[in-house]
C-alpha cells in the first residue's frame, strides 16, 4: 500500500527538480520572451486601432477618456483611437528592437492613463451596483496589472546595458546608491 508520506516526498522532490530546471531556462530566455510578448501585444492592439476596418473594441472608452481629459481641444475624440494605436505600435517596436529606455518612456504614461481610466470614467469599466464588478473593459484594463509586474521584472533585470550603472543587483539595492 502506498503511503501519503511517500507520495508527498516524491512530489516535493519532483517540484525541486522541475523548479530548478525551469529557473535555469528562465534565466536564459525570460527577457527575450517577455519583450517579444510585449511587442506582439502592443503591435497587434495598436494596428487593430487604425488598420483593421471597423471600430476596435476599445474605441468608445478611448474617446470617452479623450473627451473627459479635455484632449478634444487638440483633436476630435474620433482621432484618439488612431493616436493611441500609433503610440502602441511605436511602443511595440521599442520592445521588438530591445529599446527598453524608450519603451519605459512610452510604457509608463500609457499605463498611467490606462489605469486613470478607471477613475476618470468609471462608468465604462464598472458594472453597477456591485462594487468591483467589472465589465469587459474594466477587466481589459485590470489585466494590465500583470503587464506592469512583467515590465518591472524585465526592467529590473535587463534595463541597463551596463550592469554597473544599475543600483539594483540580484533583487537587492547596492550599498552606496540612493
Image (tube, grey):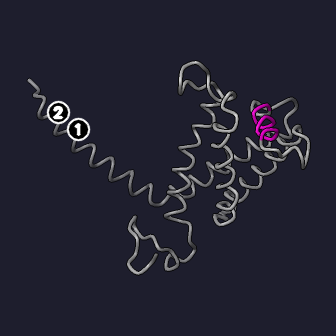
Coordinates of residue 162 in the picture (x, y in percent): 54, 77
User: Residue 127: x percent and y percent?
Assistant: 61, 21
Q: Secondary structure at mark 1?
A: helix
Closer-to-camera residue (63/47): 63
Q: Is residue 63 highlighted in magenta?
A: yes
The correct choice, above or below, for 149 with respect to 52 in the image is below
- Residue 132, disc: none
- In terms of secondary structure, what is the magenta stretch mainly? helix
Local crowd size for mark 2, using a 10 Å CA cut-off: few (<14), some (14–19), many (≥20): few
Q: How many marks?
A: 2
> Does 44 sit above or below residue 33?
above
The residue depicted at 62 percent of the width and 31 percent of the height is 138
Labels 2 and 1 touching (C-beta < 8 A): yes
Q: Residue at x 70, y 34 (%)?
A: 121
Q: In which quadrant of the rendered view does residue 91 lie?
A: bottom right
**Would you call the spot at circle 1 few (<14 residues within 10 Å), some (14-19), or many (20 or more)?**
few
Q: Is residue 176 above or below residue 109?
A: below
Inspect the magenta stretch and tell me whether residue 7 lies in it. no
Judging by the rendered image, the residue that carries numbered circle 1 is: 11
The image position of residue 110, as x and y in percent, is: 69, 50
Q: In the rendered structure, which segment of residues is drawn in magenta?
A: 60-68
In which quadrant of the rendered image does the N terminus lie?
top left
Q: Is residue 113 left or right of residue 60?
A: left
Q: Position of residue 114 (x, y in %)?
A: 67, 43
Marks 2/1: CA distance?
6 Å
Q: Nearer the viewer, residue 18 or 135?
A: 135
Q: Secondary structure at mark 2?
A: helix
Q: Which residue is mark 2?
A: 7
Residue 23 appears left or right of 137 = left
Name the residue located 35 percent from the left edge and 52 percent from the top edge: 21
Q: Between residues 104 and 16, which one lies in front from this camera angle?
A: 104
Q: Tell whether 55 sits left or right of 115.
A: right
Amino acid at each position: 500500500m502506498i503511503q501519503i508520506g511517500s507520495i508527498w516526498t516524491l512530489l516535493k522532490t519532483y517540484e525541486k527538480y522541475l523548479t530548478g530546471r525551469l529557473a535555469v531556462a528562465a534565466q536564459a530566455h525570460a527577457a527575450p520572451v517577455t519583450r517579444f510578448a510585449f511587442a506582439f501585444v502592443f503591435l497587434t492592439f495598436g494596428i487593430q486601432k487604425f488598420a483593421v476596418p471597423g471600430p476596435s473594441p476599445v474605441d468608445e472608452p478611448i474617446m470617452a477618456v479623450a473627451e473627459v481629459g479635455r484632449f478634444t481641444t487638440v483633436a476630435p475624440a474620433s482621432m484618439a483611437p488612431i493616436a493611441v494605436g500609433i503610440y502602441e505600435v511605436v511602443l511595440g517596436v521599442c520592445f521588438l528592437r530591445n529599446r527598453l529606455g524608450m519603451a519605459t518612456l512610452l510604457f509608463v504614461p500609457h499605463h498611467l492613463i490606462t489605469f486613470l481610466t478607471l477613475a476618470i470614467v468609471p462608468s465604462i469599466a464598472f458594472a453597477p451596483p456591485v462594487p468591483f464588478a467589472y465589465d469587459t473593459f474594466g477587466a481589459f484594463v485590470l489585466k494590465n496589472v500583470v503587464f506592469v509586474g512583467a515590465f518591472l521584472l524585465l526592467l529590473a533585470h535587463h534595463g541597463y546595458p551596463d550592469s554597473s550603472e544599475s543600483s539594483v543587483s540580484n533583487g537587492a539595492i547596492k550599498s552606496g546608491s540612493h
